[in-house]
Image (spheres, rainbow, N blue to C red):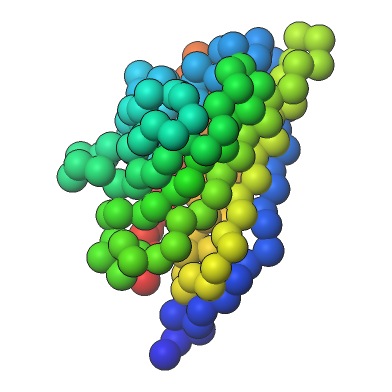
Amino acid sequence: MTANDEMMVPPDVVYVTYIRATPQRVWDALTKGEDTQRYFFGFRIEGEWRTGARWALYGDEGVHDDGEVLECDPPRRLKISWNVRAFEDARGLPPAYIAYEIEPLGETVRLTMTQHQPKPIPRKYHEGGKQGWPMILSSLKSYLETGAPLVIETPAPPQ
């Protein structure tokens, strides 16, 4: 077993980003596939945004990730379960929980994203999230403020 395969219950990961946009525009960017495809490494999110509904993130190979909408209060709060489907060894893992808090601050929004993992997962998936989320959220900010996402080399999948 390598260090990357070591099972762990990681601490919550919290990212706070300030974006010059309206709460509705940030909400739309998080929940509309035509937006996510632009800033989220080409992935397209689809779902019915109501509590109890299913959502999925699609890539070239089909469903990459999916889960359930746990809380939905547009355009203020969205909490979802998150299952990784793209990697065979991740398919049996317990879901992570992702929460987005959208708070208006005048012409700016404070977007707080929290990832909670309640059960052990391989360290490599925690490290992958710590690498990927800052890039995704930075690209989201750039996309909403300038109309152009950041051009970032997509990170390699966890090994």
Query: Which residue reaches farthest left?
Result: 61
Residue 52 position, x and y percent, is 44, 34
- Name the residue: 56% across, 44% down: 98
- Name the residue: 55% across, 27% down: 72
- Name the residue: 69% across, 48% down: 14
The answer to whether residue 57 is above or below residue 131 is above
Residue 9 shows up from this direction: yes
Residue 54 position, x and y percent, is 36, 35
Residue 116 position, x and y percent, is 61, 54
Query: Which residue reaches farthest bottom?
Result: 1
The answer to whether residue 137 is above or below residue 47 is below
Between 111 and 77, which is closer to the camera in this rendering?
77
Left or right, residue 87 beside residue 126: left
Indicate the quadrant containing the N terminus: top left, top right, bottom left or bottom right.
bottom left
Left or right, residue 122 beside residue 146: left
Q: Give the quarter of the image for residue 60.
A: top left
Left or right, residue 76 beside residue 33: right
Q: Give the quarter of the image for residue 153.
A: top left
- Name the residue: 51% across, 54% down: 96
The answer to whether residue 134 is above or below residue 117 is above
The answer to whether residue 85 is above or below residue 56 is below
Query: Which residue reaches farthest right?
Result: 106
Residue 138 shows up from this direction: no
Residue 15 position, x and y percent, is 68, 43
Between 32 and 72, which is closer to the camera in this rendering?
72
Q: Give the quarter of the image for residue 78.
A: top right
Indicate the quadrant containing the C terminus: top left, top right, bottom left or bottom right.
bottom left
